[in-house]
Image (cartoon, rainbow, N blue to C red):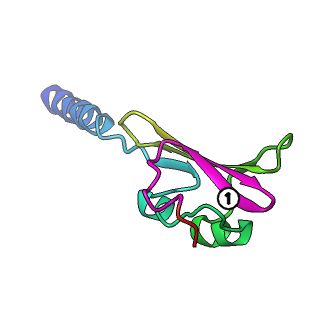
Amino acid sequence: MQNRKWLVALCAGALMFATTGCVYRIDVPQGNYVEQKEVNKLRVGMTREQVTYVMGSPMVTDQNDPNTWYYVYYMKPGWDEAEQKELQLKFKDNKLVALNGDFTTSSDFYSPL
């Protein structure tokens, strides 16, 4: 009888040990998900409304400079390293004049609509 209790305890311990290694970690996305194909649609001279239509609302607008919009995306996959991308848009007289960040500027960006 003692051997049976010992075997049950051993199996229960092995099962607990085996399942603790299979912890699921969720992906944690935050901010604006931006793809290069959306950035490629931006052109100099677009209004704020046109940019919002293409990109969505910005994550942050600068309090000191309302002519600067920030699109920030942060992704922390369950077990992998975190990834962060940023896009900064500058406006002058309600028109898009420049973009900076982790995305490439398309060759068509400087040709107005």
Residue at image position (19%, 35%) is 11
Q: Is residue 101 above or below residue 59?
A: above
Query: As rendered, which of 39 and 111 lies closer to the eye?
Result: 111
- Asked if residue 87 can be seen in this view, the reply is no
Determine the residue located farthest toward the left in the rendered image: 3
Name which quarter of the figure residue 46 lies in: bottom right
- Name which residue type carries label 1: Leu
Q: Is residue 35 above or below residue 66?
A: below
Q: Is residue 86 left or right of residue 40?
A: right
The quarter of the rendered structure image containing the C terminus is bottom right
Give residue 107's quadrant in the image: bottom left
Residue found at the very far right of the displayed protein: 64
Is 49 one of the magenta-colored residues?
Answer: no
Horizontal side, residue 48 vs residue 73: left or right:
right
Q: Nearer the viewer, residue 55 or 111?
A: 111
Residue positioned 42% across, 63% down in the render: 37
Q: Position of residue 87 (x, y in %)?
A: 57, 47
Residue 18 or residue 7, whichever sits in front: 18
Segment colored magenta: 88-110
- Magenta highlight on residue 95: yes
Residue marked by disc 1: 96
Above or below, 113 against 61 in this view is below
Residue drawn at x 50%, y 57% is 34
Query: Along the horizontal axis of the image, is 111 left or right of 5?
Result: right
Q: Secondary structure at mark 1?
A: strand
- In the rendered image, residue 7, in percent from the top left (x then y), is placed at 16, 31
> Can residue 34 be seen in this snapshot?
yes
Which quarter shows the N terminus? top left
